[in-house]
Image (cartoon, coloured by chain):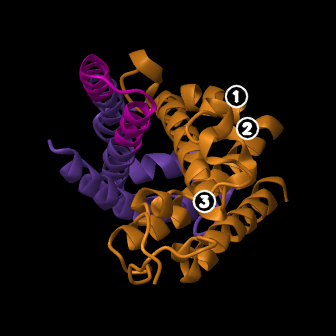
């Protein structure tokens, strides 16, 4: 992807994250009392609800895409060079995808796994 | 009008620096970059956008690890109330709540300042381009931008105080 397209992606995910993170923070203590928000039953009901579960997955992907692309931009601004750029691009991509995969596993297991 | 050397465009376009002669330009390296004296608030806002961005990313990655204990951690297979209870016993204490208040501070700043950066990226809150004139005060700060930076700072502090009230109240 061109750097200019990646910056547009950064602004797009930034605006989406603004909405999703605001909602996520409000759910932790403002719209839902804090003690209830972290209780097992409430968290379970979120993951098992199609809309809330999808929003959590969307939050995961959007924030990690924005965060890891931001890290990539900082690293490329810090030091330049073809090898460095390639190394940063690939390592950031791999770590980002691994983190998204791990978080997605939590969402899927919480939504569909057997309860214990 | 006296005829002489044509004005050097590069001189006019050079960023304002305090108290340094021309011979010092580009020679201060990292120490010069870190010297806060010549920075205006927009540059500070940029620095803090980077720092808070890295801090939020670190928290988010840790948060994904921490919330995975809802399903029993890396080797879990489904919602596990015992695993979740032991996770909460690690995070639900004074230190954990203090970290959360810091996270709110940093996230709200990054969000509001980020909204400002997007608006300025698309030119919404920038003045029309004009010739730089002595003493080269940043014209970008003559618009609502200057106020939006303070909205980000004050908003972050208020949100952190509010979350502190919830977590410690």
Left/right placement of residue A86 relative to residue A103 reads left
Q: Secondary structure at mark 2?
A: helix
**For the magenta stretch, what is the residue range?**
A67-93
Residue position marked by numbered label 1 in the rendering:
B90
Q: Secondary structure at mark 1?
A: helix
Q: Which mark identifies residue A33?
A: none
Rendered location of residue A47, percent (x, y): 38, 48
Of the two numbered discs 1 and 3 in the rendering, the one whose residue sits closer to the viewer = 3
Which badge, 1 or 3, comes first in the chain's sequence? 3
Rendered location of residue A17, percent (x, y): 40, 58
Which badge, 1 or 2, comes first in the chain's sequence? 1
Left/right placement of residue A84 relative to residue B48 reads left
Q: Colour of chain A?
A: purple
Residue A113, relative to residue A90: is it above or below?
below
Residue located at (62% from left, 31% from top): B30
Residue position marked by numbered label 3 in the rendering:
B16
Q: Mark 1 and mark 2 in contact? Answer it, CB < 8 Å.
A: yes
Q: Quadrant of residue A52?
A: bottom left
Left/right placement of residue A91 relative to residue B7 reads left
Residue located at (35% from left, 27% from top): A80
Residue B107 shows up from this direction: yes
């Amino acid at each position: 992807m061109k750097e200019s397209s990646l910056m547009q992606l950064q602004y797009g995910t930034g605006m989406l994250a603004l909405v999703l993170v605001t909602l996520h923070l409000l759910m932790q203590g403002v719209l839902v009392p804090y003690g209830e928000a972290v209780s097992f039953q409430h968290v379970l009901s979120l993951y098992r609800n199609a809309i809330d579960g999808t929003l959590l997955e969307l939050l995961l992907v959007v924030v990690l895409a924005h965060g890891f692309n931001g890290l990539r931009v900082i690293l490329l601004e810090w030091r330049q060079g073809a090898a460095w750029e390639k190394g940063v691009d690939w390592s950031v991509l791999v770590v980002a995808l691994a983190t998204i995969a791990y978080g997605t596993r939590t969402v899927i297991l919480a939504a569909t796994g057997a309860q214990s | 009008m006296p005829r002489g050397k044509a004005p050097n465009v590069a001189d006019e376009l050079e960023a304002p620096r305090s108290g340094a002669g021309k011979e010092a330009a580009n020679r201060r390296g990292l120490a010069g970059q870190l010297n806060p004296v010549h920075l205006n608030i927009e540059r500070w806002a940029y620095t803090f956008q980077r720092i808070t961005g890295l801090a939020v990313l670190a928290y988010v990655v840790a948060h994904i690890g921490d919330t995975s204990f809802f399903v029993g951690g890396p080797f879990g297979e489904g919602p596990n109330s015992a695993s979740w209870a032991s996770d909460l016993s690690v995070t639900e204490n004074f230190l954990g709540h203090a970290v959360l208040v810091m996270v709110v501070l940093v996230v709200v700043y990054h969000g509001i300042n980020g909204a400002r950066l997007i608006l300025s990226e698309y030119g919404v809150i920038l003045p029309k381009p004009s010739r730089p004139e002595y003493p080269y005060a940043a014209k970008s700060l003559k618009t609502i931008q200057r106020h939006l930076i303070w909205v980000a700072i004050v908003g972050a502090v208020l949100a952190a105080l509010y979350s502190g009230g919830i977590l410690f109240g």
